[in-house]
Image (spheres, coloured by chain):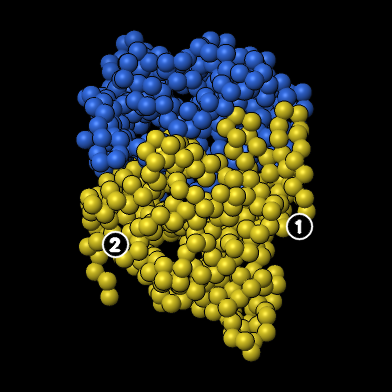
Chain colours: A blue, B yellow
Amino acid sequence: MLQLRKDPVVDRWVIIASERARRLKMVKQPQKNQVGVCPFCYGNEDKTPREIVAYRPANTAQNTPGWWVRVVPNKFPALQIEGDIDKTGEGIYDMMNGIGAHEVIIETPLHDDRVETIDEKQLGEVLWMYKERSLDLKRDERFRYILIFKNRGVIAGASLVHPHSQLIATPVVPKRVVEEMRGARSYFQLKERCVFCDIVREEISYGGRTVIVSDRFVAFVPFAPRFPFEVWLMPRKHRSCFVQITREEVNDVARVLRETLLRLSKALAEPPFNYMLHTSPCRESDNEYYHWHIEITPRLVEVSGFEWGTGFYVNPTAPEDAAAYLRGVTLP
Amino acid sequence: MLQLRKDPVVDRWVIIASERARRLKMVKQPQKNQVGVCPFCYGNEDKTPREIVAYRPANTAQNTPGWWVRVVPNKFPALQIEGDIDKTGEGIYDMMNGIGAHEVIIETPLHDDRVETIDEKQLGEVLWMYKERSLDLKRDERFRYILIFKNRGVIAGASLVHPHSQLIATPVVPKRVVEEMRGARSYFQLKERCVFCDIVREEISYGGRTVIVSDRFVAFVPFAPRFPFEVWLMPRKHRSCFVQITREEVNDVARVLRETLLRLSKALAEPPFNYMLHTSPCRESDNEYYHWHIEITPRLVEVSGFEWGTGFYVNPTAPEDAAAYLRGVTLP
């Protein structure tokens, strides 16, 4: 059984997923899966667990080709969907069963596509799927948070090259989210304004860190980025939870996300990267103080003992320089 | 000028060290520095900034061979020693000058030595140097925290192979330390016991996660480790600050640290790793609730978007299995 264990000092939860150990070796090898054997390609639908949902023509059957976005359970889940949480103590420690959902969103049937080169409409479909899966999982009362993220490249933690993102629903609100919510709540108590709304205003008015400003979204390098060329995408209007997104907003964010990733890809020669969708926890979806956003972090530098020991990051690239560089990239 | 900038939501400080950018490329290349050109080898003392202190025979001059442990300023410092902190605001954001110390502790004159193979006496000298540098820097009122850490291997953030560790003194207490102190303080308020003392008792009494138990120290895999084969070393008696360490304790911890690293090295084929010395902040050195310790984290798995997005780690190796495996390693 997968376990969730809590560090007794810093309240950090860790998933102990011994079943995933065999993946350890896979991850360290180069990504060499070919089109013919890739479990995310057309014709190999039987190589994944059975699909949860897919966007596909009405005349095609589940687990057959024809789909354009497909969601399946992760074959090596970090959390498992069946069972009770069963909180228990062990000596001075706290633990619970590793209950949750761990899904893979296959972003395109085309093995060699990249998220920055698939067209806006297709990327919009992927984002819409994020919303639909979130809405579905929010109905499960065991879940407190839904994280959607993407790993690209071995260094960023990806084990397959075919474009995909992942969704993990957790039975506790993760530490980093608790911190963000706490910070956002205390800013609101002080100023009666959403801190992210203030950030949006500040960034648009200053301009020196923005990469793209569209009607509804802004892509910018944050003031205190952990990593070189880190970029955040934020709705310009207050939106606490990603599931509130409308079709018009999805179309706009797809365009901005695609162009941001294309600029990063051109500027940094297709770097490995992660992006993470930050949104409100399931039980406080609609609030005045938090604001969903996407954080994109290229993996250009290794994280060292200093960062691990302190949570303090050394970033060798000034955000203003990174933003200017990204704005200056010539797109095809 | 190096800058410290604060994230307005989660109070995370970041060092913007644009001067270090040229290091970016170096880090991505394989470590190919040879004995002849290594700045940490005998005869190349002029290739480092001038030495701060060294253990060397009385008849040898500074910045010449003969030393057995040598401390120099980092050539590409993340923080600089000269200047005032000058806290300022920029729009809604907070920043200050990047004042601090960034030193390199060269652990041996021998290029191909490894921390786990140098003898206990030499490792004891390295640890004693940690103490002496900490005591010296604690006298500087600008500094709030002193972090000592080691990166081994490119993946762990090392850019040179010659055995060395680093020390960074920071003008703010880093986020991770604030969290640890907060957790330790609230546990103490509840129970009037140090949480780490409780952990030591629990681990020794349970035994299933211990790797080495000596007279004065215990090496164990923590209950909720972020990474496979993570090992913590803790004094068995309450010691809030590393600088309180005595010669007897240094000898004992040198033996336990060396053996732990040797076991990790044998078990995992010389993995890249970091270790970090966690100790009390400068202005609350002596207290009842915190307990210094060393955290060793082998770098076997990549950190993915899930971990970055949530601060929630997925560990594929149960700590009890890792500890049993490390205990079972046959040493020469």
Q: Position of residue B118 (x, y in %)?
A: 43, 75
Return the residue at label 1: B82
Return the residue at label 2: B213
Q: In the rendered image, is residue A286 in sight? A: yes
Q: Is residue B201 left or right of residue A131?
A: left
Q: Position of residue A239 (x, y in %)?
A: 57, 14
Mark with earlier residue (1, 2): 1
Q: Quadrant of residue B266?
A: bottom left
Task: Name the residue rendered at 49%, 20% in the picture.
Answer: A280
Q: CA distance from mark 1 to mark 2?
A: 43 Å
Instruction: Name the residue type under label 1.
Output: Glu
Q: In the rendered image, is residue B313 in sight? A: no
Task: Name the residue rendered at 57%, 10% in the picture.
Answer: A248
Q: For the C terminus of chain A, which image quadrant?
A: top right
Which SS class for mark 2? strand
Q: How many C-alpha atoms fall within 10 Å of the one at disc 1: few (<14), some, or many (≥20)?
A: few
Task: Name the residue rendered at 26%, 28% in the picture.
Answer: A87
Instruction: Name the residue type under label 2.
Output: Val
Q: How many C-alpha atoms fall within 10 Å of the one at disc 2: few (<14), some, or many (≥20)?
A: some
The answer to whether A185 is drawn above or below residue B57 in the figure is above
Q: Position of residue B17 (x, y in %)?
A: 69, 49
Residue found at the far front of this picture:
B192
The answer to whether A133 is drawn above or below residue A103 in the figure is above
Q: Please state which of residues A43 and B263 is positioned toward the viewer in this rendering.
A: B263
